[in-house]
């Protein structure tokens, strides 16, 4: 196996990770017919099988959403298993981390862990792609995702041609690293008129849960 | 003071952490209200990312398992201690399993704090955070720094602060008590 991609989203096939992987692979496969496998870490019964796939791949890419400032629990479970195996010679490992937060800075902390993880397990480190603002991606109309999708297509295309991530595209995807000052200044206003929480409110209302949105079911009185 | 300890030691792991936590618990119980959860003996599932807790049943997780008693203990504590042996450079997936699900205690709405976007509070107050980890054979200073920073980030998002992050072999129960009780 030339490339093994692991989808680390707990949502499995209905995830933003799956959407990004699809675009990446479109570009990757446009170059030629090199072998690719995609496995879901949410299928935890297949842990042994997933390890086996990883063990036979030249390149491994693990894609996941940021969960509580780090990797989701199911990804950590996979890391524990991978660390027990140790890499074969010349195996390469890279990551794609995305998060709902708009700024890529939020994912830089887990990036440091991932860099160290690749080193301690003996993989050649391919780097980590970071993309913020990914929540709701799979439900967005094509107009809103066109630019992002073409970047992931280019990322996959470049990977197939060069055997690694494009530094340029990674840099573009990481923008913005921080929320711009103007945006921060306007945020309270945007928040007040409901623009910053539109996505949440839409879903709260759809589920008839809007009135209960501030519920505190675990608060103990006194 | 109310203290909750989440012991993420995997089943069958034989280190000194669980022993330390037992000693610590005995001491803490004399003066404080203590909840010690041994995660490996509880029925807990991984977060599925369904977001029922944010937009279907606000504040309530859709998964029916033992996590509810942990949510209640955590949000009503003054101090939350994460405890785990390190494996693959991080705390256990067992501990991460419950950590992921703590988003039930936050609100989906975003606000600006520390010049960054973070989730708003769901509750009035959040516990301070401590971390006790047991080193693995190849743990070095860089690993500890990464760990400390990631837990620091979690604390920031959790409307809290990381009060201490200490390796288990370098600290006694007495010292942790002092650390926990210092203002």
Image: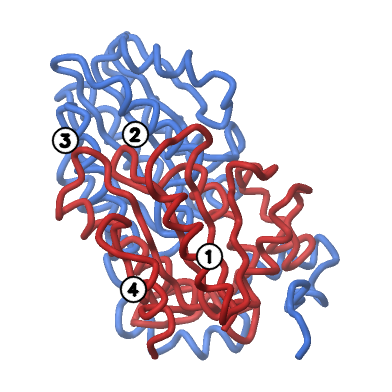
Chain colours: A blue, B red
- Report the front residue among B88 and B112: B88
Q: From the viewer's perspective, is the residue at label 4 or at label 3 nearer?
A: 4
**Distance between the alpha carbons at the discs numbered 1 and 2:** 54 Å
Residue A76, quarter of picture: top left
User: Does residue A70 sit above or below A43 in this rendering?
Assistant: below
A157 sits to left or right of A10: left
Q: Which residue is at a point 33% across and 65% down the rendered structure image?
A: B172
Estimate how packed mark 2 is, as few (under 14), some (14 to 19) or many (20 or more) residues with alpha carbons within 10 Å.
many
Q: Give the percent coordinates (x, y) of residue B41.
A: 64, 42
Task: Kindly state the secondary structure of the residue where label 2 is placed.
Answer: helix
Q: Which residue is mark 2?
A: A153
Identify the disc placed on residue B25: 1
Q: Which residue is at a point 30% across and 24% down the rendered structure image?
A: A60
**Distance between the alpha carbons at the discs numbered 3 and 1:** 37 Å
Task: Kindly state the secondary structure of the residue where label 3 is placed.
Answer: helix
Residue A185, quarter of picture: bottom left
Do the residues bearing badges 3 and 2 touch, measured as CB atoms within 8 Å? no
Q: Which residue is at a point 65% across and 77% down the rendered structure image?
A: B76
Do the residues bearing badges 1 and 2 touch, measured as CB atoms within 8 Å? no
The chain letter under disc 2 is: A
Q: Which residue is mark 3?
A: A119
The chain letter under disc 4 is: B
**Distance between the alpha carbons at the discs numbered 4 and 3:** 34 Å
**Distance between the alpha carbons at the discs numbered 3 and 2:** 28 Å
Identify the disc placed on residue B175: 4
Q: From the viewer's perspective, is the residue at label 2 or at label 4 nearer?
A: 4
Do the residues bearing badges 3 and 1 touch, measured as CB atoms within 8 Å? no
Estimate how packed mark 3 is, as few (under 14), some (14 to 19) or many (20 or more) residues with alpha carbons within 10 Å.
some
Q: Are marks 3 and 2 on the same chain?
A: yes
- Report the front residue among A111 and A153: A111
The chain letter under disc 1 is: B
Task: Kindly state the secondary structure of the residue where label 1 is placed.
Answer: helix
């Amino acid at each position: 196996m030339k490339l093994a991609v692991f989808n680390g989203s707990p949502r499995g096939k209905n995830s933003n990770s799956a959407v990004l992987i699809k675009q990446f692979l479109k570009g990757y496969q446009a170059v030629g017919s090199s072998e690719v496998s995609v496995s879901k870490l949410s299928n935890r019964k297949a842990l042994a099988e997933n390890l086996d796939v990883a063990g036979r791949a030249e390149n491994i890419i693990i894609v996941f959403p940021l969960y509580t400032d780090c990797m989701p629990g199911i990804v950590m479970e996979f890391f524990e298993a991978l660390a027990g195996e140790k890499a074969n010679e010349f195996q390469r490992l890279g990551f794609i981390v995305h998060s709902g937060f708009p700024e890529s800075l939020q994912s830089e902390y887990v990036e440091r862990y991932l860099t160290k993880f690749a080193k301690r397990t003996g993989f050649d480190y391919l780097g980590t792609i970071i993309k913020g603002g990914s929540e709701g991606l799979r439900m967005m109309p094509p107009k809103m995702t066109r630019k992002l999708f073409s970047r992931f297509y280019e990322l996959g295309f470049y990977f197939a041609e060069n055997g690694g991530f494009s530094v340029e595209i990674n840099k573009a995807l990481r923008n913005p690293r921080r929320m711009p000052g103007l945006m921060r200044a306007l945020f309270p206003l945007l928040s007040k008129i409901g623009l910053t929480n539109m996505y949440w409110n839409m879903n709260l209302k759809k589920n008839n849960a809007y009135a209960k949105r501030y519920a505190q079911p675990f608060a103990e009185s006194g | 003071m109310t203290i909750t300890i989440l012991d993420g030691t995997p089943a069958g792991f034989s280190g000194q952490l669980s022993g330390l936590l037992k000693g610590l618990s005995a001491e803490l119980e004399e003066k404080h209200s203590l909840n010690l959860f041994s995660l490996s003996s509880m029925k807990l599932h991984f977060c599925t990312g369904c977001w029922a807790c944010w937009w279907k049943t606000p504040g309530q997780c859709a998964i029916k398992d033992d996590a509810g008693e942990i949510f209640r203990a955590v949000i009503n504590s003054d101090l939350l201690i994460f405890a785990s042996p390190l494996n693959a450079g991080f705390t256990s997936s067992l501990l991460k399993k419950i950590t992921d699900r703590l988003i039930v205690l936050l609100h989906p709405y975003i606000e600006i704090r520390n010049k960054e976007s973070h989730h708003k509070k769901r509750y009035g107050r959040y516990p301070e955070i401590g971390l006790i980890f047991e080193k693995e054979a190849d743990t070095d200073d860089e690993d500890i720094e990464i760990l400390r920073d990631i837990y620091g980030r979690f604390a920031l998002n959790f409307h809290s602060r990381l009060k201490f992050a200490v390796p288990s072999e370098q600290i006694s129960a007495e010292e942790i008590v002092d650390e926990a009780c210092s203002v």
